Image (cartoon, grey):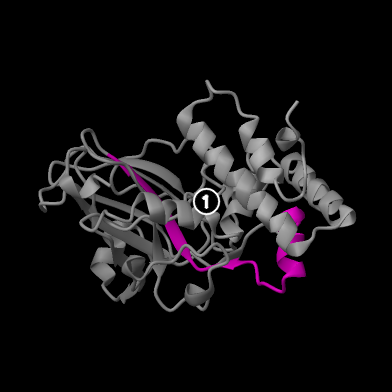
Amino acid sequence: MSTSSLFSEDRSAEVVVESFGTETDPRLQQVLGSLVRHLHAFVKEVELTNEEWETAIAFLTETGQACTDVRQEFILLSDVMGVSMLVETINNRSLELATESTVLGPFHMVESPSRELGDLIALDGKGEQCLVTGRVTDEKGDPIAHAAVDVWQANAEGFYDVQQPDIQPELNLRGLFITDDNGEFWFRSIVPRFYPIPTDGPVGRLLQSTHRHPYRPAHMHFLVTAQGHRPLITHLFVKGCPYIGSDVVFGVKESLVRDFAQVDDPARAAELGFDNPYRAVHFDITLLSENSQDSKR
């Protein structure tokens, strides 16, 4: 046995990487090899103690144990560490013609119900009424008919339906809409409110330990898909929200911030079934074709 294959502090990462079999998938070898090198370099840089390593293992174990069918604590951890946004940014950095993307978030946990254009998705009767309109187009500005626009948001008190199954109506503030022949969509909802991410688990304690607030700025989620086009995950943020500049998951992009303007129009409000005045926002969305040159990295 060659002594160079034995574990030592100096060659720790190399010994582990060299243990990978020659038939290992090349991409897996690249990713794991880089992970091992960076992880070992981190441990050496901070000279991690046994107690600290045990604490880290306990933290990760508890993070996994906190995951349920309606809560993904590991996604939450990735979000607050900025990893989710970094992955999104790297994978979409060349898409200059498309609407900017952002994180999926931990609450896209259930299938949104199919709804008709114009439907009301706020089923609990709470919140400031809002009309949401928009148009889905390709990078040339041509409308995309029959695109699927999946939307979800928190209620007026800052909770998603899956967080309050015994309080909110089932599938509250969720909807799957199909654009018309002009690529247009519209639905009735409420103005989103800022809210804290769940802080009753290990991620919440991490935020507390690092003296960070847990708030996300007010937003709506959009997942837009269409045949022959790249899917898009994005947000619509409320202009003027106090947490726009300090989103706990780093998800805000300036191009996604919109003014939810007040509309004083009694006749239109009556048509919508709204009280007057109400709020309205317009959000156009651009998808890239699968063969678009802008989609190639």
Residue 107: x and y in percent read: 55, 47
* Residue 30 visible at all: yes
**Residue 177 magenta:** no
Task: Give the secondary structure at mark 1.
Answer: loop
Identify which amino acid the numbered label 1 is placed on. Answer: Gly
| Residue sticking out furthest to the front | 2
Residue 196: x and y in percent read: 63, 64
Residue 116: x and y in percent read: 31, 40
Judge by depth and name the residue closer to the eye, 223 or 140.
140
Quadrant hosting residue 34? top right
**Magenta range:** 200-225
Q: Give the crowd class for mark 1: few <14, some 14-19, many >=20 residues within 10 Å.
A: some
Question: Could you tell whether 6 is left or right of 287 in the image?
Answer: right
- Which residue in the protein does label 1 denote? 105
**Residue located at (77% from left, 68% from top):** 209
Residue 197: x and y in percent read: 63, 59
**Residue 207 magenta:** yes
**Residue located at (24% from left, 67% from top):** 267
**Residue located at (17% from left, 44% from top):** 292
| Residue sticking out furthest to the top | 23
Judge by depth and name the residue closer to the eye, 13 or 165.
13
Quadrant of image for the N terminus: top right
**Residue located at (79% from left, 45% from top):** 62
